[in-house]
Amino acid sequence: MLVGYSLALILVACNQGARRNGMPAGAQVALDAAIADIDAGRYEKLYKETADEWRRESTLDQSRATFATLQEKLGKVHLRNLQGVNEEQTGTAHSVFVTYQTSFDRGDAMETFTLVERGGRWQLARYYVTSTALK
């Protein structure tokens, strides 16, 4: 019985390494890269690596302008606190929705990142920020 229990613990521990916070490992890597690009102001790189949905809804210049407005009104990020991760698998789509409560220089906000998987590759599809400081 003890051997079976030890094996179960090892399998659980190995399985958790593939998912952090309930998120597929590839999605976590894509999210971390997108957040690093946003925080560093690498908007062109971010835009080129986003999913088709993003590029259909916004041009590079529109994306840059949106991020410039966010930067101007909110400032730099101080701290992100993960609020939730929701994974959705439909017949043709695999998505992850990640929400953070974020503290910026000039206010607090909720950030929501939507990632989609296509062909085994995760990409940022949408990014929303809601804050009273944006009014």
Image (spheres, grey):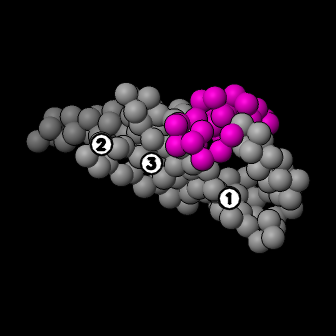
Q: Residue at x 65, y 45 (%)?
A: 58
Amino acid under disc 2: Thr
The residue at which mark 3 appears reads as 96
Q: Residue at x 83, y 57 (%)?
A: 74
- Can see residue 54? yes
CA–CA distance in space, label 3 to label 2: 14 Å
Amino acid under disc 1: Val
Residue 16 at x, y percent in the picture: 37, 39
Q: Earlier in the sequence, mark 3 or mark 1?
A: 3
CA–CA distance in space, label 2 to label 1: 27 Å
Question: Which structural element holds mark 2?
Answer: loop
Amino acid under disc 3: Val
The residue at which mark 1 appears reads as 129
Question: Which structural element holds mark 1?
Answer: strand
Q: What residue range appears in magenta?
A: 32-59
Q: Is residue 117 magenta?
A: no
Residue 79 at x, y percent in the picture: 73, 52
| Mark 2 burial class by Cα count in 10 Å: few <14, some 14-19, many 20+ | few
* Residue 22 appears left or right of 62: left
Q: Residue at x 29, y 49 (%)?
A: 90
The residue at which mark 2 appears reads as 92
Residue 45 at x, y percent in the picture: 69, 28
Question: Which structural element holds mark 3?
Answer: strand
Closer-to-camera residue (58/97): 58
Q: Quadrant of the N terminus?
A: top left
Q: Earlier in the sequence, mark 2 or mark 1?
A: 2
Q: Is residue 58 magenta?
A: yes
Residue 58's place in the image compared with 128, above or below, is above
Which one is closest to the eye, mark 2 or mark 1?
2
Closer-to-camera residue (18/77): 77
